[in-house]
Amino acid sequence: MKLLNTLLTIFFIALITWSCKDEPKRVVKKAEVAFKKEGELRILRANSDSLLTKLNIEIADSEYETQTGLMYRSSMDANQGMLFVFTDVAMHSFYMKNTEFPLDLIFIKEDLTIGSFQENAQPLNESSLSSKIPVQYVLEVNSGLVAQWGLKIGDRIDYEKL
């Protein structure tokens, strides 16, 4: 009887294993996170106040939003960005984990002037990208826009929350 139970157990394990191999693999399609306009942002030249660009922005100001940012998105339009608003002025670091497209990161001081930037942050890269100086805001935009706008340290932003 014990031998029969052992043989039946082996048979059922083999049957389950064999039947699972023949099942088609399921592709899990993740839902695309849609852009939600929460404000408008302008970037202005430091010495002349001339308008460099105007963007529609999402605003990340909660702990969850600042931790997830643009993760799980496949792209962003050229006239869009995400503004991270921190309660503290500090050295802030970002990484590109689960971010599927390259970005330029613009680190903005408490007085809304640009303190530093990181161009062409690569998708899915988990290396730390530091602000290099204490900042309160970070603006993420598509890669290449910092160069296209001719952005310089000292240029400034202003924004309006909708």
Image (spheres, rainbow, N blue to C red):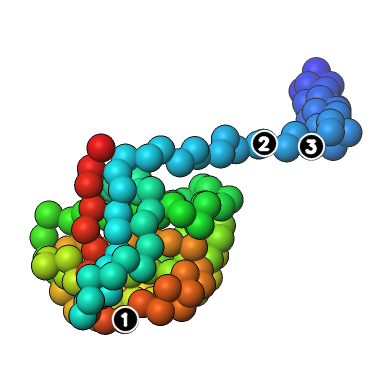
Circle 3/circle 2 CB separation < 8 Å: no
- In the rendered image, the vertical position of residue 94 relative to residue 54, given as above or below: below
What distance separates the C-alpha of mark 1 from that of mark 2?
43 Å
Look at mark 1 in the image and give the residue it sits on.
152
What is the secondary structure assignment of the residue under circle 3?
loop
- In the rendered image, the vertical position of residue 27 relative to residue 121, given as above or below: above
Q: Residues within 10 Å of mark 1 (few under 14, many from 20)?
A: some
The residue nearer to you, when weighing 34 against 12, is 34
**Left or right: 129, with 111 as reference point:** right
What distance separates the C-alpha of mark 1 from that of mark 3?
50 Å
What is the secondary structure assignment of the residue under circle 1?
loop
Q: Residues within 10 Å of mark 3 (few under 14, many from 20)?
A: few
Please say whether residue 137 is visible from this viewpoint: yes
Residue at 45% across, 41% down: 35
- The percent position of residue 52, horizontal first and vertical second, equals 36, 68
- The percent position of residue 19, horizontal first and vertical second, equals 85, 29
Residue at 30% across, 44% down: 39
**Quadrant housing the C terminus:** top left
- The percent position of residue 149, horizontal first and vertical second, equals 42, 73
Residue at 30% across, 59% down: 42
- In the rendered image, the vertical position of residue 19 relative to residue 121, given as above or below: above
Residue type at tag 1: Lys
- The percent position of residue 124, horizontal first and vertical second, equals 53, 63
Residue type at tag 2: Val
**Quadrant housing the N terminus:** top right
Q: Which mark is residue 37?
A: none
What is the secondary structure assignment of the residue under circle 2?
loop
Look at mark 3 in the image and give the residue it sits on.
25
Look at mark 2 in the image and give the residue it sits on.
28
Residue type at tag 3: Lys
